[in-house]
Image: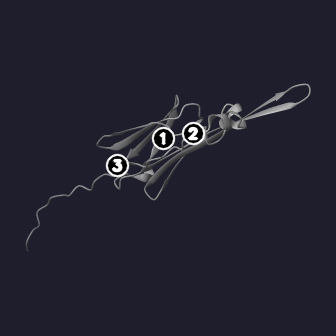
Amino acid sequence: MTLVRYSKPSTISPNLIDEFFNDDFLMGGRSLARNSFVPSANIKEDEKAFHLELSAPGFNKKEINIEVDDNMLKIYSEKRNEVENKDESFIKREFHYHSFERSFQLPENVNADKIKANYQDGILKVELPKMLKKEKKKRLIDIF
């Protein structure tokens, strides 16, 4: 299985004073770009399958999408939370966005039709079964 590399953009500003006065900085850096992350992955292999574990805490399994397209396994999610606080003179809304995306190039011997996934305790476990090799049968041929 091949890992497709992701290069996270740098969040270090060349001018710290400009960043301090930026609304995004004053709001705690809650922009979509800064709340994107690349979850850690573990990949194991045995005779029957590849086993992928992805650390994605804080997500609901309904928010996580897994798709296979042309031997590429793509796992992604976007979580949007809205918190509304009402006060006497105004309404305050806070938007929180969390997202991630990971892609893996699948080996040719993975049976994409039988991929299974389970999400529990912040860990997404994906089982990628291998195709069974057709056993070559040995037999004698009678000569007539």
In the depicted structure, whether residue 63 falls above or below residue 113? above
Q: Position of residue 20 (x, y in %)?
A: 68, 33
Label 1 sits on residue: 117
Q: Nearer the viewer, mark 2 or mark 1?
A: 2
Label 2 sits on residue: 11
Q: Which class describes the residues within 10 Å of circle 3: few (<14), some (14-19), or many (20+)? A: many
Q: Which class describes the residues within 10 Å of circle 1: few (<14), some (14-19), or many (20+)? A: some
Label located before the other in sequence (2 or 1) = 2
**Residue lying farthest left?**
143
Label 3 sits on residue: 130
Along the line of sight, the residue nearer the viewer: 134 or 34: 34
Label located before the other in sequence (1 or 3) = 1
Q: Nearer the viewer, mark 3 or mark 2?
A: 2
Q: State the residue at coordinates (45%, 54%).
A: 72
Q: Secondary structure at mark 3?
A: loop
Q: Amino acid at mark 1?
A: Ala
Assign the C terminus to one quadrant of the image. bottom left
Q: How far is the residue under mark 1 from the one under mark 3?
A: 15 Å
Q: Amino acid at mark 3?
A: Lys
Tell me: 87 left or right of 11: right
Along the line of sight, the residue nearer the viewer: 13 or 36: 13
Q: State the residue at coordinates (35%, 56%).
A: 108
Q: Secondary structure at mark 2?
A: loop
